[in-house]
């Protein structure tokens, strides 16, 4: 699934995002609002990973979602 689809249906995916990255808060999820760039920033902040790794993790997660 691509990030445009995820963003358009964000509320359907928040639980899956929080299951995958349990350090993300409800506030983080609402601020992110389905935006890949914001997810990457929050992953960097909460997990201390590099930008490239955060973006890769976000993209890999998107691929796991069913259409």
Image (cartoon, rainbow, N blue to C red):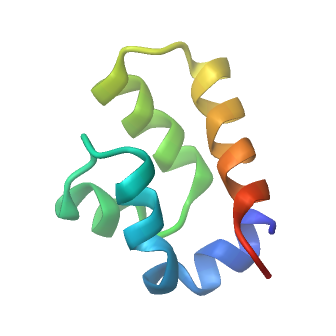
- Relative depth, front residue between 32 and 65: 65
Left/right of residue 43 with respect to residue 4 in the rendered view: left
Residue at 71%, 31% in the rendered image: 56
Q: State the image coordinates of residue 38 (x, y, percent, origin top left).
A: 48, 48
Residue at 47%, 15% in the rendered image: 49
- Relative depth, front residue between 62 and 41: 62
Up the image or down, 4 lies above or below 8; here it is: above
Residue at 60%, 75% in the rendered image: 7
Q: State the image coordinates of residue 48 (x, y, percent, origin top left).
A: 37, 15
Quarter occupied by the C terminus = bottom right
Left/right of residue 1 with respect to residue 21 in the rendered view: right
Q: State the image coordinates of residue 27 (x, y, percent, origin top left).
A: 19, 61
- Residue 14 picture quarter: bottom left
Up the image or down, 15 lies above or below 21; here it is: below
Residue at 45%, 59% in the rendered image: 17
Left/right of residue 20 with respect to residue 9 in the rendered view: left
- Relative depth, front residue between 38 and 59: 59
């Amino acid at each position: 699934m691509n990030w445009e689809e995820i963003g358009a249906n964000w509320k359907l995916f928040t639980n899956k995002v929080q299951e995958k990255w349990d350090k993300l808060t409800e506030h983080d999820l609402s601020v992110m609002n389905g935006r890949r760039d914001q997810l990457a920033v929050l992953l960097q902040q909460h997990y201390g990973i590099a930008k490239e790794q955060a973006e890769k993790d976000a993209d890999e997660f998107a691929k796991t979602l069913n259409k």
